[in-house]
Image: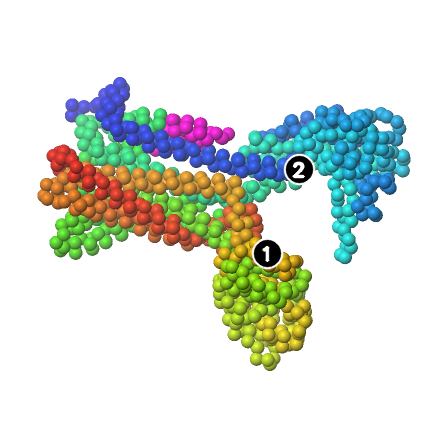
Amino acid sequence: MTGQTIPRGRGDVSWIRARLRAAPGGTVALAALVLVTAFLAAALPRAVDGYENDALRDTLRQAPLTGRTVTVSQDLSRPSDDVKALLTPRSLASTESAFQRVVRPPLALDWKQTVYGVRNAEAIPMSEPWLPRPTGSRDPQATLTAQRDLARHARVITGRLPKAGGEDGVVEGVITDRTAKTMGLATGARLHLPTTTNSDLSLLITGVVRPLDPGSTFWNAEPDLRAPKLVAVPARSGDDPKRYWHFTALIDPDATANLLGLRYGAAAYWHHVADVDTLAARDVSGVRDRILALNSGPDATKLQALTGQSGLTVDEDGLADLLTPFLGERDAAQPLVVIAGFGVATVAAVVLLMAAGLQTARRRAELVLLRARGIALPGLAARLFGESAVVAVPSAAFGLGLALLLLPTERWVPAALAAAAVAATASAGLPLRGVIAARRPRLEQREDLVTARPSRRRTVAELTVAVVVAGAVAALRVRGSADGGADALTAAAPVLVAVLGALVLLRVYPLPVRLLARPAARLNSAVLHIGVARAGRAPSTAALPLLAVLVALTVASFGGSVLAGVAAGRDHAAIVDVGADARVQSFDAPLPAGLDARVRRLPGVRDTAAVRVETGQTMVGTGTTYETVIVDPERYARLTRYIGLGGPFAPDALHDDGRGPVPIVASPKLARELGNGTATVNAAMSTVAARVVGTETVSPAASGSEFIIVSEASVRRVHHATDPADTGATTLLITGTGVDGAALRSVVRDAAPGAQVLLRSEERDAYGTTTALQSGARGVYLAAVAAGAGYAVLALLLSLLHNAPQRRALLARLRTMGMSSRQRQTLAVLEMLPQVLLGAVGGILVSVATVPLLRPGVDLTALAFSTSTPAADVSAAVLRTDPASLLLPSAALIALACAVLAVQAWATGRRGEGTELRIGDRS
């Protein structure tokens, strides 16, 4: 049949069926690989959606009701017939209906919890003398509110519900039982209501009710409906605070016209609670845009047109403000997940291509024969694609189904696209590799990595990749990631660096192997000589497994660098905030003289430094505010050396010879303002002539960035002060490991009850509180890193399987020549050890290089301090090299490869030489 065209149609189906039956093991392995890969690819976006949605909904549920509410309000202060018409229940319901027609997705509101009504615009004072007054000169204030469906939300305890149209000059209302108890009100009580026309209007309490559902929106959307609130009035300095009671009475919705005659008029409101179970994290930006559009955009114009009312406003301080911090925290956590996802996708794609390459290598003779019999490249590609697709597509669909079933979220399109990408890659891998292998007939020959000479095309391609990587890293360093969260450039940066590292290592790899070959040949041991020679004959296809290993190790170490940077940033912020391992600080008076000695005797305390800190000092001429820190130079220097904050402090710099100005150390800004001459500064409740002898960027004792440090001996010399109130220490800085906070607080409480105790460990724990977004992102990242490590191991195993037949044949021959089992195991390890070491050491080197390259472009501040913002500098929250994440994965990779090779050599010895040697004579 040479030279004839192979018929298509049913023959293709028969050929595919025959090929699948001929290699059932490979078919099952490919199906399992595609299934797992498709499941992971589809699970990643759904897992991200899941933890982000959970975090958003937890945030909304924990927020107060007013924080998750969209409120529409209208000021109705003019008493006219038109305004009265707007206060009717029918008009309020019509406005609510128009608002519901304007609201569009993704803004989701729970219409069942909607509350609307009318109240007086400002609380009015009640002048009845028998009402309670915490501060005698402040009258209690009341708000009259009309909300629909009062009877459905309350149970009447005494009296009856209010009605409209009663006697003239009387507004009927009810109060809750808690309001009645606190304010001393009962059914039948009358309260005078001040009006703008001085007409007689009073509130008649017709009943006392008890809420049926106290936690519902009806009783919580408006303030103080369930119970009165004690309100504090800001007082002038030195005056006692003034307080008054504020309570709310509920009136009939048909009696709202009476509110227009009250002071400041009336206001209508419509409260809409967010539908927590419907809102999704992906829609947060859209929800904010919808709220803004309702207030001052096209939706606001549409609402005005539907209602005919121009005074409607939408409050932006509720739901929109609650979503802003969530967006910032999500943008801070996204880079971790995107980088991990991009890395594991790269490694998975490499593994799929390697699996296709392994199949192509084993079927090379078959493909060449088909070409010799006349099949065209498109026909060959179609057959191989059909063979792969028959296995890959159902497997990917099954993996997608598992992901949709096990990880339920609203969106399914990203998961389907990810699974489709896996199916396409798995289906295209075999035809792509097969067409390349059978494109041109050529003699079969080895392509050793050591002896192969790179072509010009390869050189140009490698230089192109190097330029692209350099440009991407430079762009990331200049632009940074703090302003936009994660994007393609941030995600691809570690992978691009790994690709460049793989190209460099493949260029460098032949050099050490050639250097080892000559001395190994002179040795008497045949094992080492053969092992090095076999290592030099590694195929040039080792680039793919090396790339997979480098990407997996780089992504894993990058995650460790992120976590190490977050931990270091929190540690730095805690030490700057506290100034030591523990801090005792008094604001009103100096600390007792014996407190220092008592604290030193506590377990875990290493040393103490008592200092006096005078805050609120002002520089004459410039107005710069600073702090004066009066210290014992020797003890202060020991403190700074121990905690490592700022530069090493030289105590001799503050040595005072008793003549001339007092030497001081100042912050850089103050040092420039004071100059080199003599200047006047504030110290020990007075002024001191001083000269700057040094600068420090930060002081553990100072809470601000501007300060001066002066010796307490110099202050005593100048002032001759003996009063402890003028020179006594106000702050005690404590160093030591494991300082007992309870014991320290007990001692301080006995000696100085008003002093504040701060512990570095407690401040660190406050910063380290993990939110739902952070824990979710970290969990997904660790899962992605684990998946990437698994694929890297699989790539290594596929690389070992590629040469397994030749390796087994060689070991069988050596066994017939008398080589022992241990020697064969050693030889198998030595053959692949250089390649494994190349991947492990290369992964360490690339990971070490990645951290300084990407450090300026990755901002960890929001990720480190998302729950508690420190008062100190947070510049230490940057990428940091983590030794554990560098060494442990590489060591595990080497150990696994050696174990697999040793087991393979042992298994070869258990089988007959004839069985292994019949595989072929290729070596």
Distance of label 1 from label 2 (alpha carbons)? 38 Å
Q: Secondary structure at mark 2?
A: helix
**In the image, is residue 421 part of the stretch drawn in magenta?**
yes
The reply to whether dot 1 and dot 2 touch (C-beta < 8 Å) is no
The residue under label 1 is 745
Q: How busy is the neighbourhood of tag 1: few (under 14 within 10 Å), some, or many (20 plus)?
A: some
Q: Nearer the viewer, mark 1 or mark 2?
A: 1
- Rendering quarter of residue 671: bottom right
Q: Is 50 placed left or right of 61 in the picture? A: left
Q: Which residues are magenta?
A: 396-425
Residue 66: mark in rendering? 2
Task: In this rendered view, identify the residue nearer to me: 763 or 530.
Answer: 763
Residue 427 picture location, percent across and down:
32, 30
Q: Is 261 placed left or right of 423 in the picture? A: right
Give, as a three-letter code, the residue at label 2: Thr
Task: In this rendered view, identify the residue nearer to me: 682 or 299.
Answer: 682
Q: Secondary structure at mark 1?
A: helix
